[in-house]
């Protein structure tokens, strides 16, 4: 059986604020072979304003809420603590080493996305706090020449640390529109450009997202302890 | 002169579907595809992949490549995000050893699937 016969998820989808466009994006995600997405600021931007009508979306498609925490290290820590018990998927972008350090040091963050300067110290802390390392495939798709070389170099280094410290990995194409989706097989092929094996790529789009969603479910307390 | 059968390189045919804002013609797609390949794999890699657009009708197409470079070809197709001014996304429907196989197994199946009404 092909390793691609499983359910795939993308955890960094930007949904627009119009219902028709949302339906288009969800249809595209289904067409490209995804079983669910995590939309950034779904509750704040769409559900609270009554823009999103879940009944118009396919039943066999899951949409979770993800929150991108950002800002200075102190604000970042504060935001992670604020949202840690909401059940939302918490993602921080590792723009620089200081922010990445603050993010991985704070427990209950789920994903550190594309940290620019990842190192052995951050790798060890991320491993201790069970934080997954995110790879933004969209940055390969939407850049060219020098910028793409830079992104691939960052991803290659991050992959090295993820393997060394046994970090979970997450792949996303960070779609803003229906044209930004790529199917899981293409994502795995793009992952191959920086040395990611097909098995690692499949896990990064299926097993790891499912595991993160399990950790965010209401019954979960910590690894090995769950309310049944 | 024809290549000796034992020396003939094995090919694979990639059937794909294009989602685009604007209509794209064959020339534009070929240019963008080669540009994407040169950008990622360079001249040497592109010559090894040996890509050739076998057929394209505006929505579906078949791309030929070397048997052992299908993953690289997928990556190059996935990196195409714009053709001209319009945004584009290419979905690989499947890979076959013959043009006929790619056409019947993937493109025709996809057209049939698209034309079927959605079940409630």
Image: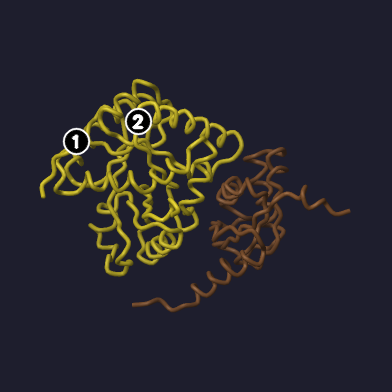
Name of the residue lying farthest toward the top: A121
Where is residue A114, by image quadrant?
top left
Kindly indicate which chain is depicted in brown in the rendered structure: B
Name the residue: 37% across, 21% down.
Answer: A120
Q: Give percent across and percent down for residue A52.
A: 29, 62
Pick whichever, A36 or B27, lies toward us: A36
Q: CA distance from mark 1 to mark 2?
A: 25 Å
Quadrant location of the N terminus of chain A?
bottom left
Tell me if A177 is positioned left or right of B111 in this view.
left
- Name the residue carrying label 2: A166
Q: Dot 1 lies on which element?
A: helix
State whether residue B90 is above or below residue A73. below
Image colouring = by chain
* Tags 1 and 2 on a common chain: yes
Name the residue: 39% across, 47% down.
Answer: A205
Number of other residues with Cα within 10 Å of mark 2, as a class: few under 14, some 14 to 19, many 20 or more: some
The label nearer to you, 1 versus 2, is: 2
Name of the residue lying farthest toward the right: B1
Tell me if A44 is positioned left or right of B42 in this view.
left
Q: Give percent across and percent down for residue A5.
A: 41, 56
Which chain does tag 1 point to? A
Q: In the rendered structure, which disc, 1 or 2, sits on the residue that comes first in sequence?
A: 1
Tell me if B5 is positioned left or right of B32 in this view.
right
State whether residue A94 is above or below residue A35. above
State whether residue A179 is above or below residue A209. below
Q: Give percent across and percent down for residue A11.
A: 35, 48
- Name the residue carrying label 1: A81
Q: Dot 2 lies on which element?
A: loop
Which chain does tag 2 point to? A
Pick whichever, A211 or A145, lies toward us: A211
Q: What colour is chain A?
A: yellow
């Amino acid at each position: 059986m092909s390793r691609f016969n499983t359910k795939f998820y993308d955890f960094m989808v930007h949904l627009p604020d119009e219902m028709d466009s949302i339906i288009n994006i969800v249809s595209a995600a289904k067409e490209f072979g995804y079983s669910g997405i995590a939309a950034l600021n779904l509750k704040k931007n769409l559900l609270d304003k009554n823009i999103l009508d879940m009944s118009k979306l396919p039943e066999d498609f899951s949409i979770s809420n993800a929150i991108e925490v950002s800002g200075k290290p102190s604000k970042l820590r504060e935001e992670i603590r604020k949202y840690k018990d909401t059940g939302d998927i918490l993602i921080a972008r590792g723009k620089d080493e200081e922010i990445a350090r603050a993010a991985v040091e704070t427990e209950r963050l789920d994903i550190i996305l594309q940290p620019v300067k990842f190192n052995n110290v951050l790798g060890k802390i991320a491993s201790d706090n069970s934080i997954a390392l995110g790879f933004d495939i969209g940055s390969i798709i939407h850049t060219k020449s020098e910028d793409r070389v830079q992104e691939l170099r960052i991803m290659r280094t991050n992959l090295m640390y993820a393997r060394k410290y046994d970090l979970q990995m997450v792949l996303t194409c960070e779609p803003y529109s229906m044209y930004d989706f790529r199917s899981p097989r293409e994502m795995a092929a793009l992952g191959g450009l920086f040395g990611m094996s097909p098995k690692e790529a499949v896990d990064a789009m299926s097993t790891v997202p499912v595991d993160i969603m399990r950790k965010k479910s209401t019954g979960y307390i910590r690894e090995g302890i769950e309310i049944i | 002169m024809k290549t000796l059968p034992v020396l003939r390189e094995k090919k694979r045919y990639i059937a794909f579907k294009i989602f685009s804002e604007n209509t794209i013609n064959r020339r534009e797609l070929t240019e963008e595809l080669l540009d994407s390949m040169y950008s990622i794999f360079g001249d040497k890699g592109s010559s090894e992949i040996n890509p050739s657009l076998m057929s394209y009708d505006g929505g579906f197409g078949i791309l030929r490549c070397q048997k052992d470079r299908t993953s690289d070809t997928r990556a190059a197709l996935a990196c195409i995000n714009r053709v001209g001014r319009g945004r584009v996304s290419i979905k690989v429907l499947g890979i076959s050893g013959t043009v006929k196989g790619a056409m019947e197994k993937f493109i025709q199946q996809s057209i049939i699937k698209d034309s079927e009404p959605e079940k409630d």
